[in-house]
Image (cartoon, rainbow, N blue to C red):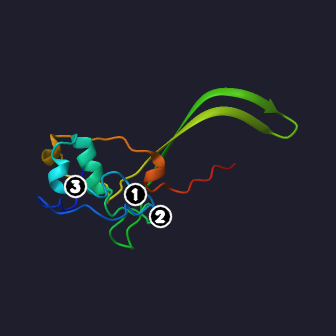
Amino acid sequence: MFRRRNRPKSGESLSGSSGDGRNWPWDALNATELEGRSFEYQIKAAVMQEYQKNSRPVRKDSDSVKVFVGFSLFHILDTDEKYQTIKSLISVRLRWTDQYLQWDPEEFGNTSKIWMYANSIWLPDILISN
C-alpha cells in the first residue's frame, strides 16, 4: 500500500527541516541512532525528512488528488423554518493518497499504518455549503 523513499545508509544524517518550519526530534539523527527506535519513529523519520505539507501530495503536476468525503449525522440540534436553516452535529471524514507518505512495510517490521497529527501533513481545502 505504501512505499517509502530511500532510507539513509548507516552513518548518514537525517539532518534538515521536515518542510513545515519545525525541527522534529529525528531531524538530527543518523541511521545508526534510528536502529534502537520504534518502527513508527523510524517511519516518521524517513518520510517526514523532506516532506512539504504546503504542496499537493502528487509527484507530477498533472496528477489530481482524489479526496473521498464522508459525513455522519449524529444529532439535529435546531431547525429554523423561517430562515430554512438547520444546526447539527456531524462528523466529516476525508480520505486520500499522499504519494510522499509511503514506505515498504517489510523494512519496518511489517508496520503498514501509523498515526500522525493532522497539522503535520497536507490537508485538502474543504468548504461545506448549501
Toward the viewer: 82 or 107? Answer: 107
Q: Residues within 10 Å of mark 3 (few under 14, many from 20)?
A: some
The residue that label 2 is drawn on is 54
Where disc 1 sits, the SS reads loop
User: Which residue shows up at 48% across the image and 50% down it?
Assistant: 119
Identified by mark 3, the residue type is Arg
Please name the amino acid that badge 1 sits on.
Asn
- Give the labeled residue for mark 3: 3
Percent x, y of residue 102 = 27, 54
The image shows residue 84 at horizontal and vertical percentages of 81, 39
Whether 107 is drawn above or below 61: the answer is above
* Left or right, 107 with reference to 100: left
Label 2 amino acid? Asn
Residue 23: give its label.
Answer: 1
Closer to us: mark 2 or mark 1? 1
Residue 65 in view: yes
